Image (cartoon, helix red, strand yellow):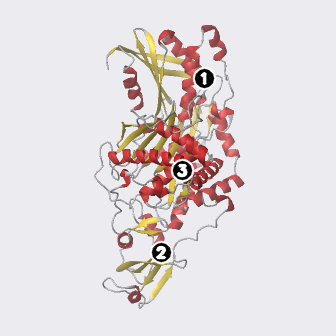
Amino acid sequence: MERHGTELVLVEFSAGTSGVADLTWGQEQVCLWMENSAPHTAHMNLDVLIECETGARTTLDDVREALRVVIERHESLRTRLNVQKDGGYRQFVCASGRVPVQVHHCAAFEASEAVLEELRRLPFTVFEWPLRVAVVTVSGIVSGVALCLSHVATDGWGIEVIAGDIRELLAAAPEERDVLSARPPRPLVQPREHAAAQRRAGGRSEARAEAFWTAQLSRFPNDRFPFPLRTPESPRFPKITMRSRTAARALAEAASRHGTTVNAVLTGALAVLVSAISELEDATFRLFCANRTSVESRNSVGTFFQIIPVALTVADLPFRDIAHAAWQASLRAYRVGERDPRRLDRVTESVASVRGVDLDLECFLNIHGYGGQEEGETLTAQGAAHELTAFDDDGGIEEWEPGKFYVDVWRVSGCLEVTLSADTALFSRDRLTGFLACLEDILLRAAAGDAPRPKDLVRDAESLAGLRRREGLVLVDGCWVDPAEVQALLTQALSPRSAQVFLEPGPTGRPRLTAYLVPAQAQRPPGPPEVHRLLLAALPGRRFVMTPHRYVVCAAGPDAPATQEEWRRYDVLAEGPGRESPAQDDPDTART
């Protein structure tokens, strides 16, 4: 990048509001993510590049004035976090201050992307403002404004609000700017108000949320992809993007044909894809809920979104049923979308304990404001076959949670854009590209048929060819389990004199795991609840394990692997499930 020089200028702001408040639930969620990912949090930074019109001859003073107005207007941009003694957070809104702006005098506008990359490559600290700004000038005229924000300050929607405000101020005639800089120009909700309103909700709504979370999480697997690990590529989690006008038209036609929304069709199509890859009848993922349901929220800068667990039955259902179930599940997720994320974490731990698994939560779907059809754009997929679908490798992330499968969806100028970030310890880059091509094919076939079944939607998918399930796995309670690994878990976590795990039909006919073991100290044998707690503590990091459904603690046992009939000949010291009884289903959490 060719630059003639740089300089640092300051934007001074002086607003009429300040104060201390709790975090919104969205801010709390982002902070929890950052705690879990530290120090690798730079990938959570949000950014945007605002291009200035060539004929506008925007000056640096114009940009500084626009930034001042926007910073004073939105409290998120002048807020710092403080960590409390108990590990919690409080946000401090400042009435005045100075935000540094790095000015880059460059030879061409193309340098702006490199300037933006410099802003976003470092994680934010609690000592800086949640907003980084750089301005690019070419021949003394501002050509672009690069913004990078902490995810604690805003979400993707809020980034567009900021960019829209700045564009509006820069495009205005001088005599209009005083009117536009009035605070607020439209109804807003500030994070402090938002946090206070969230904490006033409770009681029945909290109980309804917990019932929904429990019902969905009760269908999440221990590991959704039953494949052996491979040597990961670098970066380990690439970002592969598909851009397809064909898929955009097919999506609109499928929504019309099946009588539902484009979001429901997208969600249903992803469910079909994930079910086919995982060989599970249920598709489970965490859905991003924007939670911007009011005019005030849609005008505001802040972190409103939260992620809600969703489970959809795919099995051999017609796609129409899958899409409608996706619509219903999404509505329920949005209904409970704004809740304390720490409460959701506690529910997740409780469900995991009851089910005896370490839940796989690493599949995500984020549909970014996918709107209606653009004016003048045809709704049919016919005639679009000549438009080539493009696949691009947009870089990636080296450090992330193992098993990540993260799908982002946008719609830009009639083109469906889908980005898949996934773990190359499971899938090669080529296969990830194939998954996106398969998703496009699912949409095309869903648009062409009245009642296609999942097997029809993914037939001939090259990306699924060659996927071989790891040997030794069996399906138990919707989870892929290796009984040999369960037995190894018992041995490593308990150090018994002997132990053996059996797969047998349960009272309902579904397979269950029964463990026989001889404790190291027969005088003080552990009971099933204690055994279960010890095994739960040893689960993290193990892929295909599940704590047994029943434990039989014996005074002695066979010296070598034996049949269950042989184990039953020995004296039993204690036996039982160890697990808690699962909660009763709530009418509002019907299976979807």
Is the N terminus in the top left, top right, bottom left or bottom right quadrant?
Answer: top left
- The percent position of residue 74, horizontal first and vertical second, equals 60, 27
Distance (Cα) linking label 2 and label 3 = 39 Å
Sort mark 2 into few (<14), some (14-19) or many (20+) by Cα contacts within 10 Å: some
Discs 2/1, front: 2
Discs 2/3, front: 3
Q: Which residue is mark 1?
A: 72
Q: Please, what is the three-letter code of the amino acid marked with disc 2?
A: Arg
Q: In the rendered view, would you say 173 is above or below 270?
A: above
Q: Is residue 388 left or right of residue 165?
A: left
Q: Which residue is drawn at the image coordinates 62% and 13% (left, top)?
A: 177
**Are the residues flagged by discs 2 and 3 in contact, CB closer than 8 Å?**
no
Q: In the rendered view, would you say 45 is above or below 517?
A: above
Of pointers 3 and 1, the one earlier in the residue sequence: 1
Q: In the rendered view, would you say 517 is above or below 378?
A: below
Q: Please, what is the three-letter code of the amino acid marked with disc 1?
A: Glu
Distance (Cα) linking label 2 and label 1 = 60 Å
- The percent position of residue 515, horizontal first and vertical second, equals 43, 78
Secondary structure under tag 2 reads strand
Q: Is residue 398 left or right of residue 283?
A: left
Q: Which residue is mark 3?
A: 449
Q: Which residue is mark 2?
A: 512
Residue 231 visible in the picture: yes
Q: Which residue is drawn at the image coordinates 66% and 39% (left, top)?
A: 293
Secondary structure under tag 1 reads helix
